[in-house]
Image: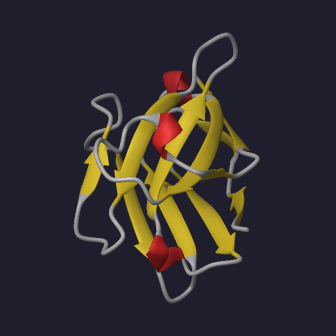
């Protein structure tokens, strides 16, 4: 069983930065493609970013491209999401996810394990 726990969320002013972390336990992080998703109140969960097992391929939603950076430290079993130039529309609960499926990485059901989420609130 794989266990994921996010941290690093909080309240930040628009234009600020935050770094989210996702600690993975139970199996090596290197076994999984990883992703970040978010869900705002009243909205569906949406893709934010993903990164391949080998750390060689990353993908971003258009809404965060150029502002967010996904990275992974397989030795530390930790996934990161560095967020810059935060906007009020980035306010959401952020979830990390781990999966073994191939194919498009922006689809939630392709991930097998999820963390409980961490709240990010951006004040304008």
Q: Is residue 56 visible?
A: yes
Viewer-side residue, 18 vs 100:
100
| Residue in view at x 51 percent, y 21 percent | 89
User: Quick check: 34 above or below 68?
Assistant: below
Give the image location of residue 29, x and y in percent. Answer: 53, 75
Give the image location of residue 56, x and y in percent. Answer: 23, 70
Give the image location of residue 108, x and y in percent. Answer: 50, 36
Viewer-side residue, 117 vs 1:
1
User: Quick check: 25 above or below 38?
Assistant: below
| Residue in view at x 46 percent, y 58 percent | 34
Location of residue 55 (image quadrant) = bottom left
Q: Is residue 41 left or right of residue 52?
A: right
User: Quick check: 79 above or below 30?
Assistant: above
Viewer-side residue, 39 vs 28:
28
Location of residue 10 (image quadrant) = top right
In this view, the residue farthest toward the bottom is 75
Colour scheme in use: secondary structure
Q: Is residue 84 left or right of residue 89?
A: left
| Residue in view at x 51 percent, y 63 percent | 80
Location of residue 117 (image quadrant) = top right
| Residue in view at x 44 percent, y 71 percent | 72
Q: Is residue 16 visible?
A: no
């Amino acid at each position: 069983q794989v266990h994921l726990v996010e941290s690093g969320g909080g309240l930040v002013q628009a234009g600020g930065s935050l770094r989210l972390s996702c600690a993975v336990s139970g199996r090596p992080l290197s076994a999984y493609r990883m992703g970040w998703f978010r869900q705002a109140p009243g909205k569906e969960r949406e893709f934010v970013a993903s990164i391949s097992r080998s750390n060689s391929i990353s993908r971003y939603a258009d809404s965060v491209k150029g502002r967010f950076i996904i990275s992974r430290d397989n030795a530390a079993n930790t996934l990161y999401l560095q967020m810059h130039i935060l906007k009020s529309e980035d306010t959401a609960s952020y979830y990390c996810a781990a999966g073994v499926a191939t194919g498009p990485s922006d689809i939630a059901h392709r991930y097998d394990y999820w963390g409980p989420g961490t709240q990010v609130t951006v004040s304008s």
